[in-house]
Amino acid sequence: MVNNVVEVQDLTVVRGGRPVLEALSFGIDAGVTGLLGPSGCGKSTLMRSIVGVQKIRSGGVTVLDRPAGSRPLRHRVGYVTQAASVYDDLSVTENLRFFARVLDVDPGAVVEVIEAVDLVDQSDLVVGNLSGGQRSRVSLAVALLARPDVLVLDEPTVGLDPVLRRDLWALFHRLADEGRVVLVSSHVMDEAERCDRLLLMREGRIIASGTPEEIRGDAHDIEAAFLRIVEGGPR
Ligand SMILES: Nc1ncnc2c1ncn2[C@@H]1O[C@H](COP(=O)(O)OP(=O)(O)OP(=O)(O)O)[C@@H](O)[C@H]1O
């Protein structure tokens, strides 16, 4: 098992003239880590920093012992943003063949990733005609093309019905079981129980980290634990 594949050290990011992330330090190990916090707390900014596309004020991020965003990490880190980045007028297979060429990866990976995200039956369908959950899986398939060791997924389950959400979480665990580090953000606290480990975030800071059991303590659920931490009560 790989430890602390992602290391964040004293990370401060300023956006629009105000600090959005303030002196964050933590590590992320193998498995599925959930980055949970309310809208606007800085989850996307933190993910952008881990992927290496965010301007950093101070501190830093290393991934697999290299600076985030550095060239050797290009194919080792997969990133799926909130906005789907696939072409609506192309089929699932056509999209993946296109991105395989752009990324200069083995075209044989196309079939492999379609199977991984469970879209074999939809592979000839035009993406514009797929459901929201299926479209999310196409974006995820693109991110998997280069066989990355680290997957950073920004709110991949937002707006999906409970069945699709459950299926996607099962997929994240399958990918983690294959040895990948999977970081998933969500502002929905009830997704916490689906993660191996959690990072709870509020107003640009990590306010708690650990397994769901550790963070819940004797609170009713993660949301209650979150409120307790924020309000400074006993845990
Ligand atoms: N381009 C930008 N310029 C200035 N401020 C920004 C920019 N993008 C985001 N911010 C601010 O940074 C803060 C954190 O935003 P971020 O998108 O990281 O939060 P988030 O937790 O991912 O939110 P959500 O769950 O709604 O996606 C917010 O206050 C936001 O207004």
Image (cartoon, rainbow, N blue to C red):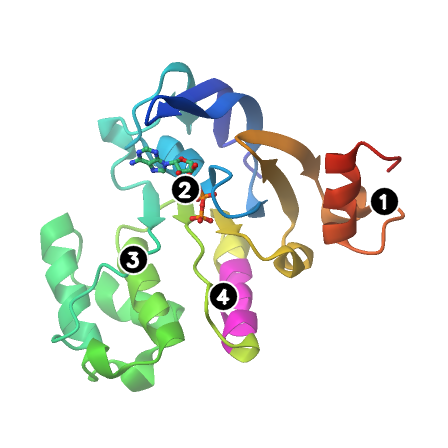
Identity of the residue furthest to the front in this view = 17
Instruction: Indicate whether residue 166 is drawn in magenta.
Output: yes
**Residue at the disc numbered 4:** 171
* Residue closest to the eye, 24 or 120: 24
Callout 4 secondary element: helix
- Ligand 1 contact, mark 2 (Cβ < 8 Å): yes
Q: What quarter of the picture does the C terminus occupy?
A: top right
State the CA–CA distance, disc 3 to disc 1.
Answer: 35 Å
Task: Residue type at mark 1: give it.
Answer: Gly
Give left or right: position of 209 versus 225. Answer: left
The mark nearer the N terminus, 3 or 4, is 3
Task: Tell me: 54 left or right of 8.
Answer: left
Query: Residue 213 appears at what percent x and percent y?
Result: 79, 48
Closest to the observer, 187 or 185:
187
Circle 3 sits on which residue?
A: 83
Most common secondary structure along the magenta stretch: helix
Is residue 108 inside the magenta stretch? no
Image quadrant of ligand 1 equals top left
Residue drawn 54% across the image and 23% down it: 24
Q: Which of disc 1 and disc 3 is earlier in sequence?
A: 3
Q: Circle 1 — which element?
A: loop
